[in-house]
Image: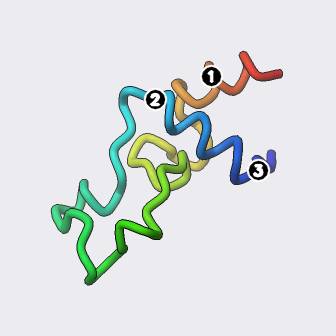
Amino acid sequence: MKYTEKQLENIAKECTEFEHIINAMGYGSSLLNISREEYKRRCTDCTNWLGGSCEIFKKIFSQYQ
């Protein structure tokens, strides 16, 4: 299933379990990997995303439908 950028961003904003893959790798956000201006919280950038199988995402997404 295809999701819009807006959907991925809105759901990530609500998620209490969101962890950006960059932070999980131990780099933090820096000029070496992502600038603060370009940083967006999206489900697809979360360690829990797992190709769209994230239970949190599915639960919140079903509420929008």
N-terminal of the pair, mark 1 or mark 2, is 2
Q: Position of residue 10 (x, y in %)?
A: 61, 37
- When the figure is inspected, residue 17 is found, relative to residue 28, above or below; the finding is above
Under circle 3, the secondary element is: loop
Residue sitting at x 52%, y 25%: 56
Please state if 42 lies on the left or on the right of 59 as rendered. left
Which residue type carries mark 3? Thr
Give the spatial CA distance, label 1 vs label 2. Answer: 9 Å
Kindly indicate the quadrant of the structure image that contains residue 28.
Answer: bottom left
Q: Relative to the observer, which residue lies in front, 20 or 50?
A: 20
Q: Which mark is residue 3?
A: none
N-terminal of the pair, mark 3 or mark 2, is 3
Q: Which residue is mark 2?
A: 15
Q: Relative to the observer, which residue lies in front, 39 or 64?
A: 39
Q: Quadrant of the C terminus?
A: top right
Under circle 2, the secondary element is: loop
Q: Which residue is mark 3?
A: 4
Q: Position of residue 41 (x, y in %)?
A: 47, 50
Which residue type carries mark 1? Ile
Q: Position of residue 14 (x, y in %)?
A: 50, 28
